[in-house]
Amino acid sequence: MIWINLIRVLTSLILTSGILIGIGFIVVQYLTNPFANLPPRPTFSEERTGSQITGKSNTPQLSPSPEVAQTAQSILSVEPSPIEDNKTRSLARITWPEGVILRDNPSKNARRIGGVTYNQTVILLETSPDGQWQRVQVEQSGEQGWLKGNNLEPVD
């Protein structure tokens, strides 16, 4: 009788530990799966090769959902305002070594719409009421957006 009880206890311990290990494995897989694949590396205009400039790409193209396509279309339809006369515009240079991110609103949580590389010249358009953000237009591309003001130095 003692041997039967001992076998029951050992069997229940083995089954319980197997179930717990299985559940633990599933939880770990669920939590680590989003980090398994790296996002695609962004390509900046300075790094583009001839095939990327002409539109031939080795990466597969994904078709966006209708609402994403509509949002993208509305963003693309906005044309940058013409650059002001050289006498009235205020120029600045990017001082952050890694470059800066252009955003659509003066907030860290705003959507990223582009970037400006180190030592690139921008045109200052306006400053936010708190003075921490500045709306700029990239001189070469005409792209407009907001960036943190402490990453700029005036150009003479």
Image (spheres, helix red, strand yellow):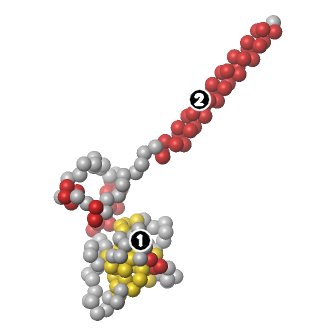
Dot 2, crowdedness within 10 Å: few (<14), some or many (≥20)?
few
Query: Which residue is at the far front?
Result: 97
Query: In front here: 156 or 53?
Result: 156
Q: Which residue is mark 1?
A: 97
Between disc 1 and disc 2, whose residue precedes? 2
Query: Which residue is at the far right?
Result: 2
Q: Is residue 13 above or below residue 31?
A: above
Mark on residue 22?
Answer: 2
Task: Report helix, strand or loop for mark 1.
Answer: loop
Q: Using residue 57 as the reference point, say whether residue 24 is left or right of it.
A: right
The label nearer to you, 1 versus 2, is 1
Residue 106 position, x and y percent, is 46, 74
Q: Is residue 32 above or below residue 1?
A: below
Mark on residue 132?
Answer: none
Where residue 26 sits, quadrant-wise, is top right
Task: Report helix, strand or loop for mark 2.
Answer: helix
Q: Amino acid at mark 1?
A: Pro
Kindly report the distance in space between the C-alpha atoms of the residues bearing marks 1 and 2. Answer: 48 Å
What's the residue at 35%, 67% (across, down)? Answer: 114
Query: In front here: 63 or 20?
Result: 20
Residue 55 appears anywhere in the view: no
Query: In front here: 14 or 118?
Result: 118
Dot 1, crowdedness within 10 Å: few (<14), some or many (≥20)?
few
Query: Which residue is at the far bottom?
Result: 87
Where residue 120 sits, quadrant-wise, is bottom left
What's the residue at 67%, 24% (across, down)? Answer: 16
Where residue 118 sits, quadrant-wise, is bottom left
What's the residue at 45%, 67% (across, down)? Answer: 110
